[in-house]
Amino acid sequence: MQYRIKNTKKTGRFTIILPASKSINNRLLVISALSKGKIQLNNISESDDSQIMNSVLNSENKVKDAGHAGTVMRFLTAYYAIQPGEIILTGSERMKSRPIEKLVDALRLIGAKIEYIEKIGFPPLAITGRELSGGKICIDSGISSQYISALMMIGSSLENGIEIKLKGDTISSSYIDLTLGLLKKAGVKAQRIDKTINIKKSEFNTLKMSVEADWSSASYWFSMVGLSEELEIVLPGLDELSLQGDAEIRHIFSDLGVQSVFTNEGLILTPGKQEINSFEYDFRDNPDMVQTFIPYCIAKDIPFYFSGCQSLRIKETDRVFALATELKKFGVNLHYSRDGENISWDGKSKPDWTKPIAIDTYDDHRMALGMAPLCIMTGELQINEPAVVSKSYPNFWKDMRKAGFSITEV
C-alpha cells in the first residue's frame, strides 16, 4: 500500500490529540504486572508496541512473540527471568538480528536461566523463571538503555535489590532517568548517582498512574509548523515537567523556527524566527529524534553535525542507511561514520523538491513519520507501506488530514 500526501496549504489552528507515550506505557505495564495489580493504569497507549506488551503479559501461551517491539523483548527478558515457569520469547525476523547478549549476560550473573534457541547473542530465548537474589551488576551502557531499564524494573522484586554499574559512555540516558522516575512514583526505593544505580527491595504503592501524551510524536508537528510557516497546532496532554527525554525538542526547535507555549488548551506551536544558520547537537539522549531533525534541517537549509547516533544502526532498521538512501532520492548526500555515531550534511548537495519521490519506510515507523513533513516542500510525496506508523502513532495519517493535508491511497 502507498499513500500520496498533498500539501493543500490550508491555514489555521488545529488541535491534535497525540497518542499516549509508548515509552512510559510499556514501562508502566511491566511495573503494574510486577506490582500484582496494586498499580492500575489510565490512558493506555493504542500503539502496536503497547498492545503487544499488554497482550504478551496477559498471554498464557508458552511462546511469547514480541514482534518488532524492542521494549517488549528487552523488558520481558528480565521480567520472565523472575516469573515461575518456562517460556520462549521470540520476535520478528528483524528482532532476531537485534542483539540482546549484554542483557542476558547481566541476568545470568545474578542467577537467571536463559538459553539461546538459534543464534548466540540474539533472540529467540528459552527462559526458565526462578527467584533471584539480586546483587551487583556491571553492564556496558553504550549499546541500549533498554537493557538497563529492564534490570531496574525487576530490582525491587529481588531479595537483595540490584546495584547497576554503568560502564562506558551511556546512550539514551534520559530513558534510564524516565524508568527511575516512574519507579519512584510507584513507591520503589531507587536512586542514580552518576554511573551507579541502586534499586532496593520495595513494596509497590497502591495507586492509579496515567500515561501522558508522547513528546516523540509531538516532534512531527513541530516539524510541520516550522516548514509550513502558516500552520498553528495545539497539542493537549503534554506535561511541561515531563520525565520524557524528548521533551527537550521544545527548546531545540525554538532556535530552529518553531515557538511553543503552554496554555489551558495545551502546548501551542506557532512559526517563529530561525535563530541559527548551522546546527550541532549530541543526540545521545534523544536518538529517536534524529529522523525528525535531519529532514527538517535539510528542508530549512541548515547544515548540521549530529553525534551520539550510533544506536540508530540497531533499531527497527539501520536508520542511518535508511535516511541516507531516501534523502539521496532528493539529491542530498549525508555523511556518516562507519559506526553511525556521527551524521552530517554540509549544505552543498541541495535538495531538488520538484521531483516526484516515493519514500520507502523499511518497516520503521519513524521513517514514515519523520519524512512525511517534507510534503510541505514538494507539494506532493508518496509514502510506501504507510501503516508502519501504527507502531507508535496509529492515528497519524488521520491527524494529518485533520490539519488540512490531502492523503489518498494509490
Image (cartoon, rainbow, N blue to C red):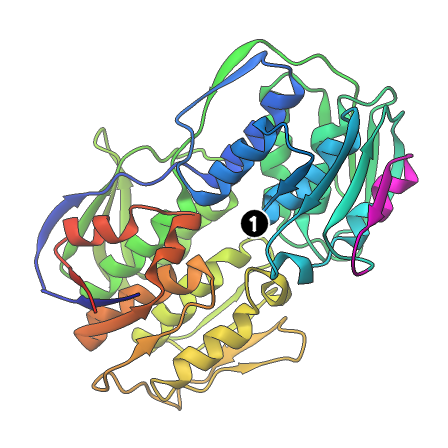
**Image location of residue 264, percent across then percent down:** 23, 28
Q: Can residue 337 be seen in this view?
A: yes
- For the residue pair 128 and 225, the one nearer the viewer reads as 128
Magenta span contains residue 114: yes
Q: Is residue 358 above or below residue 124?
A: below
Q: In this view, does 321 lie above or below 93?
A: below
Q: Can residue 275 be seen in this view?
A: no
Q: Is residue 239 left or right of residue 199?
A: left
Residue under the image location 52 percent in, 45 percent down: 245
Residue under the image location 81 percent in, 46 percent down: 104
- For the residue pair 233 and 370, the one nearer the viewer reads as 370
Quarter the C terminus occupies:
bottom left
Neighbor class of circle 1 (other Cα within 10 Å; few <14, some 14-19, many 20+) is many
Magenta span contains residue 58: no
Residue, disc 1: 67
| Secondary structure at numbered mark 1 | loop
Determine which quarter of the picture holds residue 302.
bottom left
Q: Is residue 287 left or right of residue 120?
A: left
- Identity of the residue furthest to the top in this view: 206
Q: In this view, does 41 lie above or below 38?
A: below
Question: Magenta segment, which residues?
Answer: 105-119
Determine which quarter of the picture holds residue 37.
top right
